[in-house]
Amino acid sequence: MKYLKETILICLILMVGFMSLGCSSRKDNENLNENVEFEDCAGRKITLTKKVERIVDLTFLEGVRTLIELEAEDYLVGMSEMDHQAFNKDGMLKNSYLIVSQAAPGLKNVVNVGNHNEINVEKIMSLNPDVVFVEWSKKDYADKLQAQINIPVVCVGGYGSFNYEIFSVVGKIVGKEDRAEELIEYTKTKLEAITKVTENIPEDKKKKIFYWVRPYIGDPRTNGRYEAFELAGAKNVARGDNNTPYGVYKITKEQILDWNPDYIFKHSSFIKDVEGWHTIESIKEDKIISGTIAAKNNCILPTKGHMRGWDIATEATEVFYLAKIMYPNKFMEIDVEKECNEILKKFYGIDNLYTDMSNKLRLHNIK
Amino acid sequence: MEIDIQNGIKDYKMEKRKKTFFIIILIIGIIVFGSIAITIGPLNITVIEVYRVILHKILPSFINSVDSNIENVVWLVRIPRILTSLLVGFCLAIAGAVMQPVLRNPMASPFTLGISSGAGFGAAIAIIFGKSIAKGSFHVIANAFVFSLITSFIILILSRKKGTTPESMILIGIALSHLFTAGTTVMQYFADSWATAEVVFWMVGSLSKGTWETLKYIFPVAIICIPFLIIKSWELNSISAGDDAAKSLGVNVDKTRIILMIVASLITATTICFTGAIGFIGLIAPHITRMIGGGDNRFVIPAAGLVGALLLSLSDMIAMNILEPIIIPIGVMTSFTGVPLFIFLIMKSRRRCL
């Protein structure tokens, strides 16, 4: 009792001291000399007032993948349940081949902030991020979340295989603009090796392909908008006019026969086939499909396809793979495995990643 | 008085003729529709080629076939799909036609009683977790079948405890519908996008799985259950008049109600496990039939089946061709085609009353 007042005073001083330390360590997180302003992938104006070192990702792997490719994965302090599954291979993803888990297995320990549809806002704030990534299509959600947590929320991603904007935006955020530019230019240069040839193939000489997404043989579906096919010099039979839907849609087997594609490419993003899906052999044996040119010429083949968003790196490798299959004589000098391993090493920094991927996905062996 | 009796008999005969005429018109309509539908599709096949394929199958020694691709498309794709849509529409409509008087509720149908939701829940387990009592291409079908029957059994078991009143059955059904829908939603919530999309595809229904193999399963169940239901239609008429009235006529109301629900559920489970949840047919086909021909279940049950068959196959033809090559989900199309017709008939029947 005698020393009560002094004890209280000392405790108060210590408390204020600790709090000041906390404040000063936040200050050490550096305010920028001048704000960084840009537009995100949804056209929203973003202003960054301090250097970004802590990112929470709520995209469907788009943001995580881009950070890995820009060599900025260490900035990731939190990710959504769906991203978390990709590294921990839980549930539905255990049979899929996700390159990010090969390239950055250490990310499995990044904090899970909940389902990306209903994120745990408090959990996000407890991680003290500088920026939060959300999917490019969720503009309104991004605005609401930003207003709620008072932290910049950036929409990243975009529809389409070769949407380079994501690199520019994320590169600017993490201060890796040079690396972003390097990857963009590298991809364009690499793809030119294919497109300089395929652009000159007359329309009527282009191979007609059918992209069989999720091969339930009695219930076919396809995607009419997958750039890799076009760049490889193919004509996607399901790509009608500008009203072709984005995403997967159903058609009949009779329609496939009517289109009579030269090639049928079965979507193969899984190491093991999903229960109920059909194999290439069973597709070949189907009485309707066997009437197509593709079946008669033994041109029903696997292709990686898109999985969990659009990865510029793997889709670039897919362009090489498809072009070599469809036009072997035009690309005789191209060693697909060598080129693709080089591409994936450029993006992910790992040797022989394409060889590993194509073996596990049982892609067609091209020499 | 004799004149009144004579007039009464005359009216009764006219009514019977009208109902018979209606059924004949429906049968002719189905035959005509099927004959046209079989000639429509993306592949350029002439009408002659289509019928040559059919005749070749019936009389192979007398009629030569056509190109094998055409034969395969007509025989393996178009015909089974049309037959499946007719049979499924027939079955779902009859199931609804039975459930409505049994439960004395005009909104009763496989959908409102949670049978479709139960099937969807089972399908979702198979799609999202890969867990099923069957393997291969039957893994979703088996789960959907089992869970739709589980729903029916829960309704029956619980309602027996409370007394098999229509009110208790329908309330339990509605509660189960919500429960299974919530369960499916939770699974989708945590599922990957492709699995979620697959569940959605299942929930909106599809006749793409209409093959001879599918018909091998649905047809025997239909051929046993539907005649049974038609035979029981007299008892159904009694129950519609009220439990006391039925009991006074010697009908064991509780037992009849349970048996009819089991049979109707079995037909429903057998069809929707292959096609997914196709709504509205089981609800509106019986009502359309009653508006035209009255409430006698001896007429309503077969006629509603024919109405349902025509409605579903017409919806399927539109769904396949309106945005060709894209197929609109059949569950959506049945609502788009059925609702305007239903409202038109309601308005017409109300004006008559006035």
Image: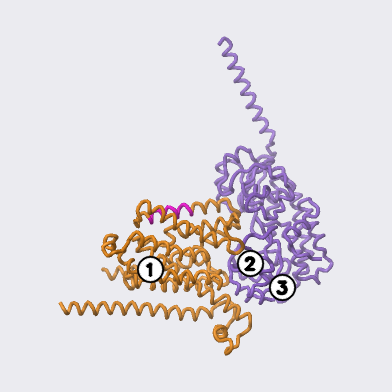
User: Label 2: few (<14), some or many (≥20) within 10 Å?
Assistant: many
Q: Residues within 10 Å of mark 3 (few under 14, many from 20)?
A: many
Q: CA distance from mark 1 to mark 2?
A: 40 Å
Q: Which residues are magenta?
A: B169-180
Residue at numbered disc 2: A224
Q: Is residue A243 visible?
A: no
Q: Nearer the viewer, mark 1 or mark 3?
A: 1
> On screen, B339 above or below A36?
below
Tag in front: 1 or 2: 1
Q: Give me the residue at 36% from left, 54% from top.
A: B168
Q: Position of residue A262 (x, y in %)?
A: 70, 74
**Kind of residue indicated by mark 1:** Pro
Task: Indicate the chain coloured orange by its letter.
Answer: B
Could you say which is closer to the camera, residue B302 or residue A17?
Answer: B302
Q: Quadrant of residue A121?
A: top right
Is residue B207 visible to the viewer in this orientation of the structure?
yes
The answer to whether A347 is drawn above or below residue B19 in the figure is above
Please determine whether, in this image, residue A287 is positioned above or below residue A313.
Answer: below
Q: Indicate the chain on which mark 3 is placed.
A: A
Residue picked out by circle 1: B286
| Label 1: chain letter | B
> What's the residue type where badge 2 is placed?
Gly
Q: Is residue B32 magenta?
A: no
What number of labels is visible? 3
Packing grade of label 1 (10 A; few <14, some 14-19, many >=20) is: many
Any idea which chain is the purple one in this picture? A
* Quadrant in which the C terminus of chain A is drawn: bottom right
Q: Chain of mark 2?
A: A
Hey, what amino acid is under mark 3? Lys
Q: Dot 3 corresponds to which residue? A: A207
